[in-house]
Every structure is written in C-alpha cells, then in structure tokens.
Amino acid sequence: MTRTLGLISALALATAIGGCATMGSRGSDMPPLPASATAPVNYVRDVHSYARPEIARVRHVALDLTTDFAAKTLAGTATLDIDGAPGATEIVLDIRDLDIRDITDASGATLQYQTGANDPIMGQPLTVRFPALTAGETRRIVITYATRPNAAALQWLTPAQTAGGRQPYLFSQGQAILTRTWVPTQDSPGIRQTWDARIVAPSQLKAVMSAEMLTPEGEAAGAGQTAWRFRMTNPVPPYLIALGVGDVAFEGIDERTGVWTEPSRLHAAHDELTPTAEMVDVAERLYGPYRWGRYDLLVLPPSFPFGGMENPRLTFATPTIIAGDKSLVSLVAHELAHSWSGNLVTNATWDDFWLNEGFTVYFENRIMEALYGEERSLMLQSLGWGDLQSTLADLPPADTRLKLDLAGRDPDEGLTDVAYEKGAAFLRTIERIVGRERFDAWLKGYFERNAFRPMTTDLFLQDIRAHLITTPELERQTMMDAWIYQPGMPSNWQPPVSDAFAPVDAAALAFASGGPASAIPWANWSTQERQRFLAWRPPVPPATGRWMTDAQLADLESTLNLKTEGNAEVLFAWLQIAVQHRHQPAVPTLEHFLTTMGRRKFVLPLFTSLWAQNEWGRPIATRIYAQARPGYHPVTFNSVDAVVGRPR
C-alpha cells in the first residue's frame, strides 16, 4: 500500500485527497485528459475508490428520490456540484448495482458517460465527460438513476419484520463503501461533501436522515405521498449520508437530544437513553463544542447490523442496547464520541480506520468515567482488553498493526478490535506517559486544528510530534512507530486492571472447580461483571474444548435464568459457552436469538462457533441460517455466507 505521497499539510489533504484505481477501458470517443488536468499533485490514494480527485471532485450532492417499497428501489436524481483542475473534462464516480438512466448538465443538455468493468467489492467507475473546466469554476451535473433491490446499503423490511407489524421500513448503512450502492458519488472517506435531499415516501411513513430536517411535517407530493427535505451544511464523508423511512415517532430528552423509533418502543427507548443529554455536555467539557446542532438517536428494527452508526445528528442504533437498566449506554457514548473522532476528523482511507475507532473508544471511556466513575470505566476497558487478546490470537500478524494494507480486500476486514481496542490502548499509553492534563490539551487541539478534514496516520504523527511528543525521550517512551507499524503489542503496554473483577474471577474459578451456581452472587452484579464471569476460560484450555460438565451447564442455565435473559450482551456470552460445549438444551434459545436480531457482532461469532462444532454444530447452523438470513442486512449475511455458505 502506498501511503502519503510526500509530506503534505492537512489543508492540502483536505482539498486534494482522493483515490486512484484502474478504470474500465476508455472508449475511442473518450479522448485523453488535457495535460493541465493530469499534472501530478499530492493526494492520498484510496484503493477502495475509483475517484480521481486530483482531476475533479464532488463538493455537494443534492438527492431527489422516491421510495418504492413494492419494487424495493429508490429512484430519482443526484445533482452533483463538482470542481477540479483547470482544463479537466471528466469526473470519475463510484457506483455499484445502480441503473444509470441519464446524465445531463444544469441546463438539461445530455452529457457523455461510460461505466467500467465491475468489481465485486468496489463496483464500477462511472466516468462523466463535460466541457473543460476553467479556473475556480464549479460545474453541475444531474444523474437520473435507480437503485436495485439488492443494493447492499439498503434493507427493505416487510411489516412483519417491524415492531408495529403494520408498515414497511427502509434504512441505509453506508460504511464502509456501500453508499455507492444508493448514491452515485465519489465514495471515499477523504472526499468530504455537503449534501441535501428530498425524499418522497408513502404518507403513512416518515423519512429521517443524518441531516437537519427542514420539513418536520412533510410536504404534499401527490396522492398518498409526502416529501421530506433535509440539509447538511458541514462537509462529511459519503458513508455518513444515511436514510430511514418507517412508522417512527419522536420524543425529546432535552432541547438538543431525543429519540426516534417505532411508536410501540418509544417509551422504553426514551427512558433507556436519557443519559444521552448529559453525555453531550460531558463530551463538550472534555474536548470542545459539539459542531452538528442536534444529537438524536434512531433506534432501528432488530436487523440493523451494527450496535450503532455515528451518522451526524442522528445516530442509528440497535434495539439490543435497550436492556431496561441503562447498562449498555456506553454504546451511545461511543457513537457520540464519533461526532469528534470520525465525523469531525475522519480517516482518509480505510487503511487508517484506527484513527476513527481507536480515538472513539478512548473518548467513549472518558465519557463513561466522567458519568459513572473510574471503576465502571476500568471494567469496560478490561472487557475490551480481553476481546483484543482473542482478536490478536486469531488474526495474521500483518492485520494486528494499526496501520493496515487493505488493497484488494473488502475494507470491512479492517473492522476488528485492533482498530478499536489496540488504538485506544495506544492513546491511553501516551496519556499515562505525558499525563492526562497535557494529553487532553493536545487532543482538544487536535480536533480543533483538523476539524472537517480527513486524516492519515502520517498527518497524525506530524500533529502529535509538533504539539505533544516533542522530545527524543518522549518519543522513546511512547514507542509510537512500534504501536502503529509493528504487529502485536509493544513492550510498553499495560493491561487495564479492574479491582471489581477480582471477586468475579474468584467466583468463576470456584464454579469451574465444582461449586454450585447458587453460590454465584449474580443478582448483585452489574452487566459488566456478568459479562466477565461468562467470559472466564481456563488458563490452559482442555484438549476437548470443554471446561464445564453437562451438569454444570444445566445448573448455570437454570439457576441464573439464562434461557430468559433479556440483556443481549449477557445472553450472547452464555450462548457462546453453550455452543462450545454442544449444550443441546440451549439450542432453542440460540435459534430465537439468531432469528430475531441481525447484529453482526453477535450473529457472526455464533455461526462461526457453531460451524467449528462440525457434525453437531453444522446442521444446526445450516438450519437456523436458512431461516434467519432473509431478515439480515447484507453487511451481516455477506459475512456469515463466508462461514456457513449461502442457503440453497
């Protein structure tokens, strides 16, 4: 992977960053680019985009789309404002599974275009020709198109797949490179764009987006149709353009936070998420003003593939965080923290994904510490640390580096605990060495200096070496290059230690040694303590892979009421144990869990564990997956297909 081409400033990166990849063949009617448009410039090559922003780039996207739930399509126009090098005569966009019907200029005159060869991961380049740009000119093109029913970013739900059971539902999920399946644009995180939208939907439904809502009551748009208008004036990476359409209602928490979800779930979701308002206040005190206006949450149907998605102004969230006791609200702290790390300062390419997630896990933990105390913070750190150790053991060494090389691979392969937990551990190591006060001052300044700009690892290192790690001794102590470019964990790492987990570990050992489940103080434990108990494994795993007897499994399941456990994190931890022990009585619970939610964090590991159980687990996995797959988002079922295979 070619990293930054020379040393470039953050400002130059913000104006010139983009991608470069092999285009489809150029037709004889497509003359070569003028020399002025092909002059070399400094930019970051994004191997997951066909865009050539050194020639021309998208500045603004205006969508006018109509939903068709029967056909499972969005159709209409995307109007793109573009600028580029003087003399440029074309722009290269990213598309995947889009039906392009027409492309014109602002006056309606037809423009010449062609699509290139299709790649199963990247889709196709869409090259649009126009008269040569002059210096400082912004050109407008209008693309008439429709999505296809298989658009990977979009999930069309039937009424039966919703809580209300009466209306259909649509939502999008664009990260990492799926926005190109519903918006023809330059789909690279380094090519930030402002945008607006008009969405037409059946009048019984409401559209919401990751932007300012301009028409809270909607506008008439023909018989049985209502239009909703939105505007995002801050430039954002395309993966943050997000849409939801369904029978949803809203309840505010305070003057700038609130919750959207289906009406039957609104009261429970609102009560669970009331800490959101205070989290925003805490985050601002830590690292500067919230720059996006409102911060609301959309709690989606259970098929949403992630815990949360940090779409600006409107975090998309899984209903699995509604535990009834606010025990899983750290997810909200995480998505809120992305309003600074990720949305404000964004990884320029997916090779630098740790710059989004490592910073966000660190920031999330600081919010949780401020609200709930140091012990809760340490428990969360310790659980994350345990997940990281498992990940490091499973991945090839090259994928345990913070700076990745994902060329030729799906960028989703970088969505591991390395980016999240190793990245956060790196930042905590720097904080420990320089002191929290100095670290906080640097981090707040980092967000201010680089707001609304893409970021690379090289630029991060330039910034921190200019403003914090300024001496050879600090450089030696922090070992920054080792953390970023070397596999595994550097020698200066220190695992987090939670004193609250000591009695939990003792209880786990006592039970594993033959004690009764009735001796476990389960009722007095927090969710995090319960997760820790269920995550316990023998220091030396037995050759059979089993560390409990059938009698112990039955005792645990019955005494702790695990068949009726409502906390998704706890239930997932138990089902992993049950599968690894081939505990047949837990299969109905497992089947219900896997067929009633589609969060990839839970679904993929459970199917992977089932598949590893060979003659016992594979028939169960095949049967359950055939039933569950139609309810999963493509982000989830594409991952599980690679393990179980696509049902016939």
Image (tube, rainbow, N blue to C red):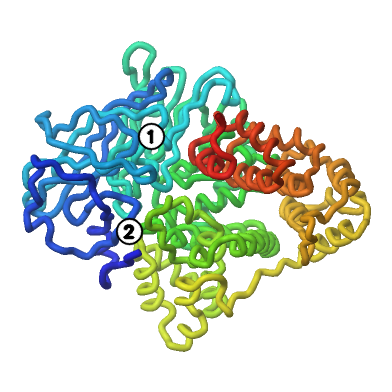
Where residue 491 is drawn, which disc sits there?
Answer: none
Q: Is residue 32 above or below residue 247?
A: below
- Which residue is at a point 39% across and 52% down the rendered structure image? 291
Residue 520 in the image, given as x and y percentages of width and height:
88, 53
Q: Is residue 85 above or below residue 112?
A: below
Q: Is residue 246 above or below residue 472?
A: above
Alpha carbon distance from label 2 to label 1:
24 Å
Query: In the displayed structure, does residue 84 sit left or right of residue 147?
Result: left
Residue density around tag 1, few if under 14, some if 14–19, many if 20 or more, within 10 Å: some
Q: Is residue 369 visible?
A: no
Mark 2 and mark 1 lie on one chain; the one further toward the N terminus is 1
Please identify the quarter of the rendering in which residue 115 is found: top left
Front position in the image: 498 or 40:
40
Tag 2, which secondary structure? strand
Quarter of the figure with the C terminus: top right
Front position in the image: 201 or 131:
131
Spot the residue most to the top: 223
Q: Amino acid at mark 1?
A: Met
Residue 349 in the image, given as x and y percentages of width and height:
36, 57
- Which residue is at a point 26% across and 43% down the rendered structure image? 125
Please identify the quarter of the rendering in which residue 141 is found: top left
Front position in the image: 648 or 52:
648
Query: In the displayed structure, does residue 542 sit left or right of residue 70?
Result: right
Q: Amino acid at mark 2?
A: Arg
Pointer 2 residue = 453
Q: Are marks 2 and 1 in contact (CB under 8 Å)?
A: no
Quarter of the figure with the N terminus: bottom left
